[in-house]
Image (cartoon, rainbow, N blue to C red):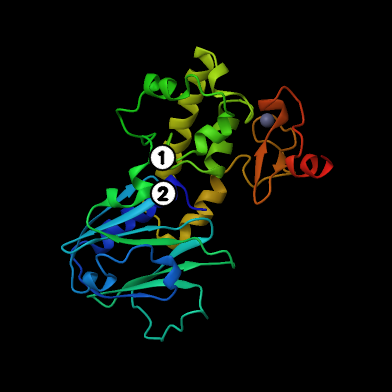
Amino acid sequence: MPEMPEVQGLVEFLRERVTGLRITRAAVANIAALKTYDPPIDALKDAEITGAERHGKFVDLATTGPRLVFHLAKAGWLRWYDALPATVIRPGKTPIALRVALSDGSGFDLTEAGTKKSLAVYVVRDPADVPGIARLGPDPLDPAFDRDAFAALLEGRRTQIKGVLRDQAIIAGVGNAYSDEILHSAKMSPYALASTLSAEDVDRLYAAMTETLTDAVAAASGKPPAELKDAKRRGMQVHGRRGEACPVCGDEVRSVFFADNSLEYCPTCQTGGKILADRRLSRLLK
Ligand SMILES: [Zn+2]
């Protein structure tokens, strides 16, 4: 799943590449992906793109007409074409959810792999009309979001820090992968309760979060969409690296499995050597 750094990379790419172009066609191939009906998607035809912004993991293209907003969800991606192919898209028989054609012959598809479709497209007058954007918490790289603002968000929350970091209503843009990386960098257990963190823990976690995300945004910046996924994978120390050696201490990276995903961590760096229980197995045993 693309998270804040990759979405930021996409937004910068689009801002550079499509600002000033007109949308000549916006065609929905998977009707379930389009979450709005007013304004209609046809209102994008002939609108000129005036900019691109990121809100959490949402991409927001501003136009002289309505705004085109999308969220790539778990298995979605943007495929860019300098010359958009003329092939006809048959709804239902394609991973393409949306195709946008632009006035210089370029364009892009939003695609989604797998059977569970959750990529979402919105045509709105204001980005705040998208419910997922309206409820976003602060952006962790916003200069106003300092250590004390972060501490205030954690205070009194008797929930595991892993879940707090991933909750878009608390902090915008961090998902499963970067929360693993942030916690590894902070040498903190994913199960630590937010409300029990000491002032030093919060210092360390805040520094780990801003450094991890700043580095990842720098790595994503200037890369074309096709290279962003690999850049993300290369930058990971523990996420998606179960069984490999921790680059910090050499211990084996472990996973905890959940119903539809997993987290990775290093026991030596993060849990004092303790192996965390596999949630999937312990649920079966109950
Ligand atoms: Zn380690």
Q: Quadrant of residue 248?
A: top right
Q: Is residue 280 above or below residue 24?
A: above
Q: Quadrant of the C terminus?
A: top right
Q: Determine whether, in the image, residue 282 is placed left or right of residue 143.
A: right
Identify the disc placed on residue 221.
none
Q: Which residue is mark 2?
A: 57
Residue 172's tag is 1
**In this rendering, is residue 209 above or below 230?**
above
Which residue is at 43% across, 25% downward? 153
Left or right: where 146 falls relative to 235: left
The amino acid beneath tag 1 is: Ala
Please report the residue visible at 49 percent of the width from the left and 61 percent of the height from the top: 76
- How many angstroms separate mark 1 from mark 2 (CA)? 7 Å
Instruction: Answer with left or right where residue 65 lies relative to residue 94.
Output: left
| In the depicted structure, whether residue 17 falls above or below residue 56 | below
Foreground: 223 or 56? 56
Check the image and name the residue furthest to the left: 64
**Mark 2, other Cα within 10 Å: few <14 / some 14–19 / many ≥20:** many
Is residue 81 visible in the rendered structure shown here?
A: no
Q: Residue furthest top?
A: 199
Q: Position of residue 156 (x, y in %)?
A: 50, 19
Residue 252 position within the rendered picture, expressed as x and y whole percent measured from the top left: 75, 37
Q: Residue at (41%, 20%) from the top-left corner? A: 152
Left or right of 85 on screen, residue 260:
right
Task: Say which residue appears at 38% left-offset and 66% top-offset.
Answer: 34
- N-terminal of the two: label 1 or label 2? 2
Residue placed most toward the observer, 164 or 210: 164
* Residue 194, image x, y percentages: 54, 23
Q: Are marks 1 and 2 in contact (CB under 8 Å)?
A: yes
User: Quarter of the image holding residue 218?
Assistant: top left
| Whether residue 143 is visible | yes
